[in-house]
Image: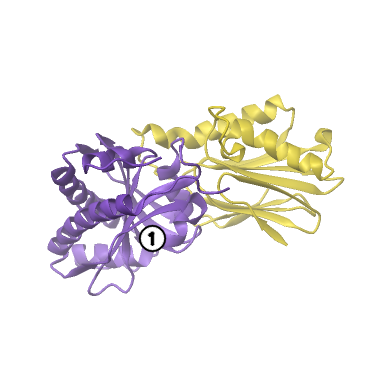
Chain colours: A yellow, B purple
Amino acid sequence: MIHKVGMADAKAAKEGDSLRTLGLGSCVGITLYDELTKVGGMAHIMLPVSNMDKEVNPAKYADTGIPYLLEMVLSLGAAKARLKAKIAGGAQMFANAHGLEVIRVGPRNVEAVQETLGKLNIPIVASAVGGNFGRTIELDCMTGKLGIRTAQFGESVI
Amino acid sequence: MTNKYQLGDEAADALREIGNIGAAHAATALSQILHQTVEMQVPQVELIPFDEIADVVGGPEAIVACVYLKVTGDLSGNMFFIQSLDSAKQLTGEVLSEVKQIELLNDLEMSALGEMGNILTASYLSSLTDFTKLKMYPSIPYISIDMAQAILTIGLLSDAPMGDYALVIHTSIHNSKAMEKAHIFLLPDPGQEVVLLHALGMEIQK
């Protein structure tokens, strides 16, 4: 079955299932995958850094969402040492909007994701980030392959 | 996750009236540009979970043509003029008196679309300023043609005190020839609805 990962959401699944998130713009989709146990996880983060407020949804931020996703895949039997990450998204949807601070959020999200994964010692084995177009991604937990669909540039697999 | 933040009926009515006034002026402006009747629907004011916002315009992956303007001033927020690609082609064709049969919009059509977004937003906001005395300044129009959710996210990026919900003041408009509706969204930044309601002489209960 295909598990839908919403905005500011994270889910983990096993062999036979897929994880999908739709319409990543400046948001970043992060997948963690253990090829031995075939456990995969996907998070859809919107912002780089949480303000550590108690009530926030951890899956909304790169710095809290990735550890949150890590716990999920570990609880399904993945081993941290075998985990490999793939990331996609972090676009600037409005190509001409240089003056707006909010426009920079895509690249900032990507930086925060790379930094958080680095701190956790999880290698990023593939990424499809930047540009000015949206992406839908799907992780196949059987193979660990990440399919990417765009509106203007077709489909690819990383 | 439960929605702990609720909008009272009275507050929703007041915000709907804001949407009504703004969209009516925007529709009038569009009508003058097109020399056609433009109809609008009763505005809706809703707290919508992030995941469901794109459903209003056809779903997260629906390809839309969107004009976005950031609003700053006494009220900060986001304006979107959003419609299907077909609808955008039809609309720019009306203004430019020609329709090019290519898949995407050419530079001239993009420019025309951006200018329409600009005029609609200016009409919308200036009528709100007359009504509320709040000063609001739109940015220049930014255009994107892509997946609806990927685009609309830009209006959802503030740290929301109300969780993963956005207040959306939504009106759809269409001219007599168009089969599909175009949408005007006003998304006040989180917490800014209090500013709007205060300007209308109301206090929001938390």
Q: Is residue A58 above or below residue B149?
A: above
Asked whether residue B172 appears in the rendered view, the answer is: yes
Q: Could you tell me which chain the residue with mark 1 belongs to? A: B
What residue is shown at x 48% (from left), y 61% (from top)?
B59
Tell me if A66 is positioned left or right of B109 in this view. right
What residue is shown at x 25% (from left), y 62% (from top)?
B92
Tell me if B43 is positioned left or right of A90 in this view. left
Residue B1's spot in the image, x, y percent?
58, 48
Residue B153's spot in the image, x, y percent?
45, 46
Residue B200's spot in the image, x, y percent?
21, 44
Question: Furthest residue to the front?
Answer: B205
Q: Is residue A151 above or below residue A10?
A: below
Instruction: Tell me the quarter of the picture where residue A4 sits.
Output: bottom right
Q: Quadrant of the N terminus of chain A?
A: bottom right
Q: Is residue B160 above or below residue B7?
A: above
Report the residue marked by disc 1.
Answer: B104
Q: Nearer the viewer, residue B112 or A142?
A: A142
Residue A144's spot in the image, x, y percent?
76, 49
Q: Residues within 10 Å of mark 1 (few under 14, many from 20)?
A: some
What residue is shown at x 74% (from left), y 42% (from top)?
A72
Tell me if A60 is positioned left or right of B117 in this view. right
Asked whether residue B147 appears in the rendered view, the answer is: no
Q: Nearer the viewer, residue A148 or B124?
A: B124
Q: How many marks?
A: 1
Q: Amino acid at mark 1?
A: Leu
Element carrying mark 1: loop
Question: Furthest residue to the top?
Answer: A119
Question: Furthest residue to the right?
Answer: A36
